[in-house]
Image (cartoon, helix red, strand yellow):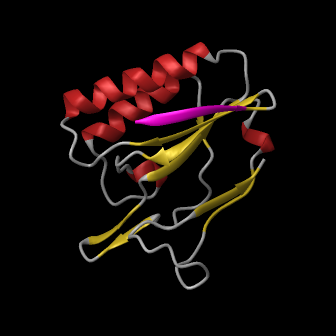
Amino acid sequence: GFVAVDCGGMVIVSCYFSPNLEIDEYDVALGELADCVRSCSGSPIVVAGDFNARARIWGSNDTTQKAIHLMELMSALDLRLANMGTEPTCIRAQGTSVVDLTWATPGMLPRIRDWRVIPGEELEALSDHRYISFVV
């Protein structure tokens, strides 16, 4: 699911995609997100959240089908990845991955500064996911 908020003319969308979604369910959820983004067309947009989609291009060890569908959608929506570096955003006993992603419209991308994954020793998350911080 997701929530979208208009913050002074810029739209911030926070989302979560369960790792338990089958690919067809994932595609339905992506479609709902796409409808939301399209309804905000013309506004600067940031879409951030746990997409549970691993891809080498953003620092994971493999690329999943979910990531391929996500990349295709974000390309179609003209959203750009704002993540900086390949620091893992999720650290589990099974391994690390980058599944927490921040996307932005082209005009919004340069306004995102200081994007970073906050290390667990700096701020305890009480989760296997690390906090993401950035300034707009």
Between residue 89 and residue 56, name the one nearer to us: 89
Q: Is residue 62 above or below residue 127?
A: above
Q: Is residue 48 above or below residue 118?
A: above
User: Residue at 43% across / 66% down in the picture?
Assistant: 129
Q: Is residue 85 left or right of residue 34?
A: right
Magenta part of the chain: 1-6
User: Residue at 41% across / 53% down in the picture?
Assistant: 99
Between residue 17 and residue 90, name the one nearer to us: 17
Q: How far from the left and from the top, in percent, is residue 121?
A: 55, 85
Classify residue 5 by image quadrant. Answer: top right
Q: How far from the left and from the top, in percent, is residue 11?
A: 68, 30
| Residue 2 sits inside the magenta stretch | yes
Q: Is residue 80 left or right of residue 21?
A: right
Classify residue 8 by image quadrant. Answer: top right
Q: How far from the left and from the top, in percent, is residue 55?
A: 38, 49
Q: Is residue 114 above or below residue 5?
A: below
Q: How far from the left and from the top, in percent, is residue 111?
A: 80, 42
Between residue 77 and residue 133, name the one nearer to us: 133
User: Residue at 38% across / 21% down in the picture?
Assistant: 31
The chief SS type of the magenta part is: strand
Classify residue 116 by image quadrant. Answer: bottom right
